[in-house]
Amino acid sequence: MGELDPSLNIFPENIAHIHLMGICGTGVGALAGMLQSAGYRVTGSDQHVYPPMSDFLADTGIEVFAGYSATNLEPRPDLVIVGNVITRQNSEAQALAEMAIPYVSMPQALAHFFITNHSSIVVAGTHGKTTTSSILATLLDKAGLEPGFMIGGLVNAFGRNFNIGHGRHFVVEGDEYDTAFFDKGPKFLHYRPAIAIITSIEFDHADIYDDLEAVKKSFRRLVQIMPPGGCLVVHYDDPVVREIAGEANCQVIGYGQEVGCDWQLSEVRVGTRATSFQVQKNGDFYGEFENTLPGVHNALNSLAVIAVLDRLGLAAETIRLGLSSFPGVKRRQEIRGVEGGVTVIDDFAHHPTAVRETLAALREAYRDRRLIAIFEPRTNSSRRRIFQDAYPECFNDADLVLVKEPEPLFNIASTERFSSSELVGALVDKKINSNYFSTTDQIISFLLANTSDGDVVAVLSNGGFDNIHSRLLAGLRQK
């Protein structure tokens, strides 16, 4: 089996043609679009070439090869970017090693081509990265600062998840997931932060981290690479974040709801279409703000952005106006439609904390309506038993819970796999009306027979969930 030559993990001097392996991933696809816009010839390959990413790449004129093969590297590219979905056993990775072509990871490429010569603002944490970085990029743009960005979700203000930008700042969602098969360190170590936000630190990504201590070690490395003149903006209500931020050699700004935070949130009022709150800076009243996302957790995400923008010199009124008109992020409490009086909401929540906070926010927003939660355990962590005992405590705000049986992880023992039926049994014991289903079709049929005017259906999954949102809305329309 061929091994990549570490000496070829470089950027050659003359680059015209760049090939991306795993191009249909959210981050790699965005990077491909940025490189195409920057004038490079871009090609790519992936095993899963389907909409919406396939449509996006086709619209840009990027040639995408379905499947992995040595022939995808002909004609020979000047540089290959290897997505973290690629394994060392991949046939195209084997060909890359044999052909001795220079190669880099996606985070390396993003830093080299687009973060260099910019002031990097990295948004990291177990929860809230996409929403927080989207708010930050949108408000910087509204202030006329033309930021570049790469974010893990589609930012409604731009209609995409990336922007090259012409201003000083580059906003990047800093993922703690590993970089590539040849670099098992977290992605965010490549992003050269001048400012970093840490929203939360919990155990997640059980496929690459053994326990919380391993996750903390990665975040410690992020704190260690902060320059002395840099700034950490951290959620001080989270004791793990507070612990790790205490090791920083740069300025640390704490935000949260607890007394003593540099930036303190208070008087939070959650409505159907907006959340209002007050902000104190160093104990003094700073302003009253409103965002378009329900929930205390989204008010905290907004507070982190306010702290960063204030440090960058933006006036409170400029921040307030930008935040009040923030148009949201795809798949973050996104209302997909209303049919027959039934509101269908799509959310990316999958970690127990995210599920709990999302449902709490929706309960506050829709106080007098029946809230139906549909949960798909799909991540490498949620399909393991590690959160089996945690999930039953996360659905207290739902009136009805429907759980899909997950696709099993065949590389782990059956005794270590998550059980939807066990979750439903625990919820029933707590007097929460619940059912589990083998297929998405069964869930849709159940909903069409058991929903009525005024119901709110929240679909919680980090995947496409067999297009359940559109199919349910279409069925409700016919009903």
Image: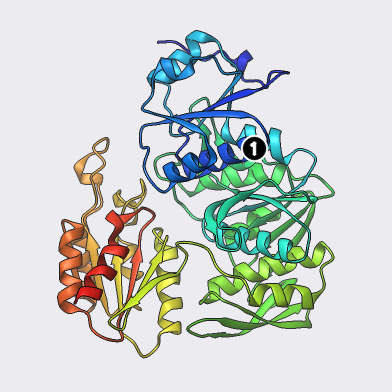
Q: Nearer the viewer, residue 73 or 425?
A: 73
Residue furthest out toward the bottom: 368
Quadrant occupied by the C terminus: bottom left
Q: Is residue 260 visible?
A: no
Q: Nearer the viewer, residue 218 or 7?
A: 7
Up-down relation of residue 145 to residue 193 (above or below): below
Q: Position of residue 199 (x, y in %)?
A: 60, 60
In screen coordinates, is 191 left or right of 58?
A: right
Question: Mark 1: few, some, or many residues within 10 Å (few <14, many ≥20)?
Answer: many
The residue lying at 70 percent from left, 33 percent from top is 112
Up-down relation of residue 210 to residue 2 (above or below): below
Q: Nearer the viewer, residue 22 or 418?
A: 22
The residue lying at 15 percent from left, 76 percent from top is 449
The residue lying at 72 percent from left, 41 percent from top is 115
Quadrant occupied by the N terminus: top left
- Find disc 1 in the rendering and name its residue: 110
Q: Amino acid at mark 1?
A: Leu
Q: How many marks?
A: 1
